[in-house]
């Protein structure tokens, strides 16, 4: 039996994000299209004989206790299977934190997938996704990866083909945004909803210009009002030649898409002039396993 495993935990971006209502349990109903990108954390798992969960992170300000979603994932899978084994989890963090890129959720999903393999538990991705929902709304999508429309709290997934291949240029301004705070300020009665069916169609057709045209996120207005700097990044992204740009999740990360490598480089250098955290990666968009 294997003693250790390394699992890739890719970030996600939202191509669309819509909020369609508020539920009785206090959560919001969402409809959003997410896809994975080649910006990943690496999760190392070492099986222990002793019944405990250790978390070690390469960045000091990230919790290494039960507040870490990776810890919660290990606990959930142990409770569900009744396993008395322990695990040591090392998180090599490359995805910016509190950025709207599901960094914590994808780490949790990687722990679920990794422990399933390491301990030969034989759980399906569907079962792991169901366990993931106990941890957070983005975890079920991150368990599967790929490209999907997420509805409900984010757990009802309809899978799509990968979007057309392209470069993704991301800018993370030096601030954190509280998702809860953004949700609390959303005006459900006065919002312009994304054309979700149009985006689904554009992805199915592999039509890159249409994908760029349909990028939309209802949270932008709230985040832009609170942090005008984020709006400025989007403005510059388009000025420097991105074919389309939108904020991911509740922000503050903004990304731009282009199929031209030369233009991706130009965007990188133009944005790097006034922002420290700029990344150029590819869209992944294909499912795990």
Image (cartoon, rainbow, N blue to C red):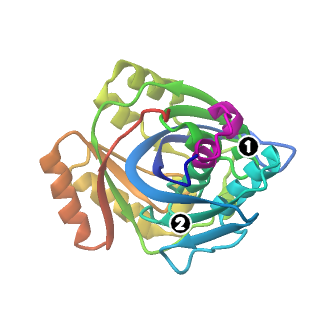
Q: 92 or 217: nearer the eye?
A: 92
- Tell me if I can see residue 79 in this picture: yes
Q: x, y percentage for residue 78? A: 76, 52
Q: If you read the primary sequence from the N terminus, does the residue marked by circle 1 or circle 2 appear first?
A: 2
Give the left or right position of residue 212, taking residue 149 as reference.
left
Q: Which residue is found at the position 73% from the left and 66% from the top?
A: 52
* Marks 1 & 2, CB-CB < 8 Å contact: no
Q: Which residue lies furthest to the left in this view?
A: 262
Q: Total marks drawn?
A: 2
What's the magenta region?
Answer: 112-129
Query: In the drawing, what numbered circle is on residue 205?
Result: none
Our reading of the magenta stretch's main secondary structure is helix
Q: In this view, does 121 lie above or below 255?
A: above
Q: How far apart are marks 1 and 2 (CA)?
A: 21 Å
Residue occupied by mark 2: 90
Please tell me in which quadrant of the rendered image residue 171 appears. Answer: bottom left
Give the left or right position of residue 91, taking residue 94 as reference.
right
Q: Which residue is found at the position 79% from the left and 44% from the top?
A: 81
Give the left or right position of residue 36, taking residue 184 as reference.
left
Q: Residue furthest bottom?
A: 60
Q: Which residue lies furthest to the front in this view?
A: 1
Residue occupied by mark 1: 131
């Amino acid at each position: 039996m294997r003693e250790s495993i390394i699992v890739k935990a890719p970030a996600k971006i939202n191509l669309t994000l819509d909020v369609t209502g508020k539920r009785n349990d206090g959560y919001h109903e969402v409809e959003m299209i997410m896809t994975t990108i080649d910006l990943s954390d690496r999760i190392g798992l070492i099986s222990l004989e002793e019944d405990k969960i250790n978390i070690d992170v390469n960045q000091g300000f990230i919790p290494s206790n039960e507040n870490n979603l990776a810890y919660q994932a290990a606990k959930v899978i142990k409770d569900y299977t009744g396993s008395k084994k322990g695990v040591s989890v090392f998180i090599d963090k490359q995805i910016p934190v509190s950025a709207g890129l599901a960094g914590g959720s994808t780490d949790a999903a990687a722990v679920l997938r990794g422990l399933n393999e390491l301990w030969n538990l034989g759980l399906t991705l569907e079962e792991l996704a169901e366990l993931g929902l106990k941890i957070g709304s983005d975890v079920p999508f991150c368990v599967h990866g790929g490209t999907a429309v997420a509805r409900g709290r984010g757990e009802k997934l309809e899978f799509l083909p990968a979007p057309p291949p392209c470069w993704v240029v991301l800018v993370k301004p030096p601030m954190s945004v509280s998702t809860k705070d953004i949700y609390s300020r959303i005006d459900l009665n006065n919002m312009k909803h994304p054309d979700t069916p149009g985006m689904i169609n554009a992805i199915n057709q592999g039509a890159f210009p249409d994908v760029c045209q349909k990028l939309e996120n209802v949270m932008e207005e709230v985040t832009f009002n609170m942090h005008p700097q984020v709006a400025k990044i989007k403005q510059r992204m388009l000025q420097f030649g991105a074919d389309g740009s939108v904020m991911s999740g509740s922000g503050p990360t903004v990304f731009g898409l282009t199929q031209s490598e030369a233009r991706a480089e130009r965007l990188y250098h133009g944005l790097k002039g006034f922002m420290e955290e700029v990344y150029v990666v590819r869209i992944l968009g294909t499912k795990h396993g």
